[in-house]
Amino acid sequence: MTRWPPAPISGLPTEVTVYEVGPRDGLQNEPEVVSLAVKLELIARLVAAGLRAVEVTSLVRPDAVPQLADADELLSRLPASPGVRHPALVPNLRGLERALTAGAREVAVFASATESFSRHNLNRSRSESLRSLAEVAGHARQAGIPVRGYVSMCFGDPWEGAVDQGEVVGVATQLLAMGCAEVSLGDTIGVATPGAVVALLSRLAGAGVGMGTLAVHFHDTYGQALANTLEALRCGVTTVDAAAGGLGGCPFARSATGNLATEDLVFLLDGLGVATGVDLAALARTSLWLAQHLGRPSPSRVVRALAASLDA
Ligand code: MG
């Protein structure tokens, strides 16, 4: 694989944490169910490629998300990797209990910026959901476990259309107030463009939210994820969510392209000279290997571009 010399631009962080969501957010939204052995190998390969934050599964009801029905066993069989975070998503207190029993050392919770998505996806009003998450976060903190918060539908909502950024700020600040160490802003349907990203981050900064407590979670459904990422970095965000190989698709647009592909993100950051610690070739090989198990090629442009040179 050719290594292109970096061409830095000013005003960017020197280092970015790539928060890998493929094993959870990716596999949860793939039609194929992969075996526990493949999941464990995927996580091991992602860690070997240099990723230091890999969200591994979700403790949802097995009948609701059969793709992640092995969550408890996966957590209990996960080898300890010093210096590596392996958060598990927990929807409620029952999920938290399961995660703790199986040995999770970090959890994540999920809220919606909009009332409609909360009712459709979580079957609860937004305020009921936030009350329940506050209980989960409180119990997790008592157990000494850090909590990450997600806000979904930060830019657009399939039922409501454009989202009022004041609502996003309200939900994000509530997640921080209940003790979330980090809040990830999700563009769940992938409609954000760079100006909207700058406007939201400015409003959050105006509300006293430090950029170091935020992460961005862009979807590439409309091809905007990298442009949005660059603007978020310029604003001071240093944690970016992505899924290896662009795993996951987009359930709201029936598009093959959902989560920003980690390879596309790492190619951009390598080019800018921003350190991630991730070995792009090892990562792309992992996505090519996983694509065989999923029976479809990776939608990542970088994985496709590198495929021939990595096979050779
Ligand atoms: Mg996602």
Image (cartoon, rainbow, N blue to C red):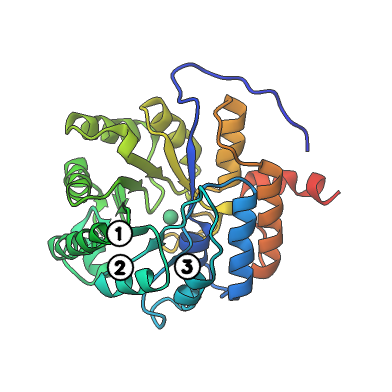
| Neighbours of disc 2 within 10 Å: few (<14), some (14-19), many (20+) | many
Q: Position of residue 191 (x, y in %)?
A: 38, 46
- Secondary structure beneath label 1: strand
Amino acid type for the residue under numbered disc 3:
Gln
Answer with left or right where residue 21 lies relative to residue 50: left
Q: Where does ligand 1 appear, by image quarter?
A: bottom left
Q: Earlier in the sequence, mark 3 or mark 1?
A: 3
Observer able to see residue 245: no
The residue labelled by disc 1 is 110
Looking at the rendered image, the disc whose residue lies closer to the viewer, 2 or 3, is 2
C-alpha separation, residue under disc 2 versus residue under disc 3: 14 Å
C-alpha separation, residue under disc 1 versus residue under disc 2: 7 Å
| Neighbours of disc 1 within 10 Å: few (<14), some (14-19), many (20+) | many
- Secondary structure beneath label 3: helix
C-alpha separation, residue under disc 3 versus residue under disc 1: 14 Å
Amino acid type for the residue under numbered disc 2:
Pro
- Secondary structure beneath label 2: loop
Q: Is mark 3 within 8 Å of ligand 1?
A: no
| Vertical comparison of 45 with 36: above or below | above
Q: Which mark is residue 221?
A: none
The residue labelled by disc 2 is 91
The residue labelled by disc 3 is 28
Q: Quadrant of residue 87?
A: bottom left
Answer with left or right where residue 292 lies relative to residue 8: right
Q: Position of residue 240 (x, y in %)?
A: 45, 41
Which quadrant holds the N terminus?
top right
Amino acid type for the residue under numbered disc 1:
Phe
Looking at this view, name the residue that lies furthest to the right: 312
Marks 2/3 in contact by CB < 8 Å: the verdict is no
Q: Earlier in the sequence, mark 1 or mark 2?
A: 2
Marks 1/2 in contact by CB < 8 Å: the verdict is yes
Marks 3/1 in contact by CB < 8 Å: the verdict is no
